[in-house]
Each structure stands twice: as structure tokens, then as C-alpha cells.
Image (cartoon, helix red, strand yellow):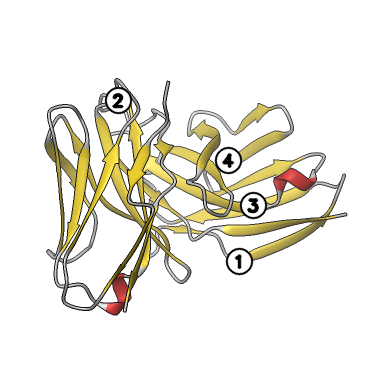
Amino acid sequence: DQQVKQNSPSLSVQEGRISILNCDYTNSMFDYFLWYKKYPAEGPTFLISISSIKDKNEDGRFTVFLNKSAKHLSLHIVPSQPGDSAVYFCAASALRDDKIIFGKGTRLHILP
Amino acid sequence: KAGVTQTPRYLIKTRGQQVTLSCSPISGHRSVSWYQQTPGQGLQFLFEYFSETQRNKGNFPGRFSGRQFSNSRSEMNVSTLELGDSALYLCASSSDEGSGTDTQYFGPGTRLTVL
């Protein structure tokens, strides 16, 4: 049973435009959400997080939105840059449980 | 601070063999988690160690085991290797004291190929 779902395996976006990566979860106990970015041959690196008491968190070009009723979160990258081409993993955890569950990832291609 | 290191970076084994992977966390981090990454399944949680004790475990068979030493370094062992064990094995460390919100820092991974 996949508790964290990233339904788009890949996404192509023009440089300078907005990239929107989506993530759905099924476990209502999740109350902390993270996004990681991964380049080939490197481990994932932390990008941004959000707790369930918020519905938006912003850090520079990256904004994460959380819709608890829909069990949906999204990562917005504005403006998209060539260096943003990578695989993005959505992850979730329940604060009382240290296990972090990852989605399968979405490969983002930024087109020149 | 030095990042998370994993050794070896690449490994080729044959079916039936066993393998041990090593992970050195960031200095001061006491939590070490292991993940398996495959193209079809994405990143899957294997287990987490904190202060030499396994604190969490994913849904993997008993062939997958691990341990953590007093210096927080961790090893992961896979016995009786199967072709399906070919994957990138990632280790992540955090200073997590149990809140579940601390950032995990990943190593570069060990690419295991089983022939």
C-alpha cells in the first residue's frame, strides 16, 4: 500500500516558468511533509518542509502548499532554472513515529 | 562538517552471496536510516537505528539486517542475495532525538548489482 504517491513520473517545464510537482498521501496520521531533490549519482538533499499546522511554507523560489482535507501537497518552483532538473521526492511522517515514507519521485526536466 | 559517507560506492555480487554496506553519519548525528532505491519502487525505508538500537523497521525480509556501533557508524547486511536486491542503497543521518522533524542528510549511496 503506497502511502505517499507522486503520480507524475516526469514533468517538463520551460526555463523561467513555474514548475508544480504534486504529491498525495493516504495516511491521515501524517503531520509533517518534506521535499527532497536528487541529482544522479548523489544522495537526496533536503529542500523544504511543512508541518500540518500550516498550509504554506516559502523559501526563496520554492513554496510548498498543503491541503489537509484533500491529503495533497504541491511544490512550486518559480522561476524554474536549468539547475532544477532533478528527481524530486515527496516524503511524509507522523511526529509520533520517526519513520519517513517517500514517494517514488518525479523527474523534472527544465527546457531551455 | 563532513557529510554522510558510504562505502563502498559500487559493488557487484552474485546470487546467494552476502554483502555488508557501511555508513558513517555526520559527526554528532545519532540517528541513521537506510533506504533502498529502485526505479520501480522509488525510495523505500529499510530500518532506522538510534543509539545502537533499531528504532523502526520497514517491510523487508529478514535477509536485510543492520546494526549501529557506539560511534553511530552503521552497517547494513544483506544475506543470500537475489537479483531483485540490485539497487541503490542510501544511508541518511539526522540529529533526530525523536521529534520526527529533523532533516535527514543523505550519503551518496552504494550501488549494488547482483548478477
Q: Is residue B47 left or right of residue A18?
A: left
Q: Determine if residue A1 is in view.
A: no
Residue tagged 1: A9
Residue tagged 3: A86
User: Percent from the top left, x then y, of residue B92?
Assistant: 36, 40
- What is the crowding at mark 4: few (fewer than 14 residues within 10 Å), some, or many (at least 20)? many
- What is the crowding at mark 3: few (fewer than 14 residues within 10 Å), some, or many (at least 20)? many
Residues at discs 4 and 1 both on one chain: yes
Residue at 70% of width from left, 51% of height from top? A85
Residue at 39% of width from left, 28% of height from top? B102
Dot 3 amino acid type = Ala
Q: Which mark is residue A66?
A: 4
Callouts 3 and 1 close, C-beta under 8 Å = no
Earlier sequence position, callout 3 versus callout 1: 1
Callouts 4 and 3 close, C-beta under 8 Å = no
Q: Is residue A17 left or right of residue B107?
A: right
Give the letter of the chain under mark 1: A
Residue tagged 2: B29
Give the letter of the chain under mark 4: A
Spatial CA span between label 2 and label 4: 29 Å
Spatial CA span between label 3 and label 1: 12 Å
Spatial CA span between label 4 and label 1: 20 Å
Spatial CA span between label 4 and label 3: 22 Å
Residue at 17% of width from left, 56% of height from top? B77
Disc 4 or disc 3, which is closer to the eye? 3
* Quadrant housing the C terminus of chain A: bottom right
